[in-house]
Amino acid sequence: MPLHVPPAPAPALRSVLTALSSPTAVREARTPALLRSQGPVTAELPLPVHVLDRVTAEGVSATRLAGWRFLIRCGDRAVAAAETMLTPDGWAFSHFFEGPYITSTERALRQAEAMPQPYQPRLLSVPSLYMLTLWLHEDSTADGAAGHPAATDLLVPLAPAPPGIAAHRPHRVAELLPVLTHRATPTRLLRSPA
């Protein structure tokens, strides 16, 4: 089934395209693959990036939209990504980057394309675990900038994943969220009786 990629805000896309056309922005980015790219580059697959801040006592995840991420493609492969952020003046280009999450995101998106059910792809960051997942939202017509993971949505951990969590293995939110919550909860030091 095809994925239903939500449309990015037009100002976010414009800010990325402006940065891509700026030799200064590209040169100052610490992205050797983008600097070495031969031929035209395009910004594709805008994915809203949500951050999992906490899980409430009722088990509801508190997420917030942190930005939009675009894969930067040159030829047949993604060479970098561009991230935008919301400022008081609207959406603005934040930075270019590269690394393992670029290829891992492409791989997870290909996996999701092969699934029988349509999904809306998003990214869900779990900063306390240094973890990024492809969040496959079941409501493919929803506003990509809003909402929180539903129990039946899928999370696909991207590589590198934290120890003990298999990358590229889809998990229902109801199964993976408790594991993430447990891991992200700070351990309390027990005092020995005096």
Image (cartoon, grey):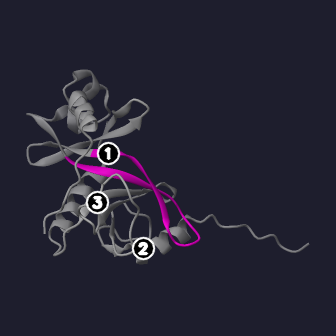
Q: Earlier in the sequence, mark 3 or mark 1?
A: 1
Task: Bin the neighbour count of mark 2 within 10 Å (Cα to Cα): few under 14, some 14-19, many 20 and up.
Answer: some
| Residue under label 3 | 142
- Residue in the foreground of this view, choosing between 93 and 156: 93
Segment tinted magenta in the rendering? 45-69
Residue 96 sits above or below residue 110 on the image: above
Badge 3 or badge 2: first in the primary sequence = 3
Relative to 40, is 98 above or below?
A: below
Q: Would you say the residues marked 3 and 2 are in contact, meaning their CB atoms lie under 8 Å apart?
A: no
Q: Residues within 10 Å of mark 3 (few under 14, many from 20)?
A: few
Find residue 23 and report its image quarter: top left
Label 1, residues with CA under 10 Å away: few <14, some 14-19, many ≥20:
many
Give the quadrant of the C terminus. Answer: bottom right
Q: Is residue 155 left or right of residue 79?
A: right
Query: Label 3, label 2: how many angstroms apart (C-alpha)?
Result: 22 Å
- Tell me where residue 124 appears, x and y as whole percent: 38, 58
Q: Which residue is mark 2?
A: 176
| Residue at x 22%, y 48% (from the top left corner) | 7
For label 1, the residue is 68
Q: Is residue 100 visible?
A: no
Foreground label between 1 and 2: 1
Q: Is residue 156 above or below residue 23?
A: below
What residue appears at the point 21 percent right and 61 percent down from the top-left corner? 109
Instruction: Find out whether residue 33 is within the magenta segment.
Output: no
Magenta portion: prevailing SS class: strand
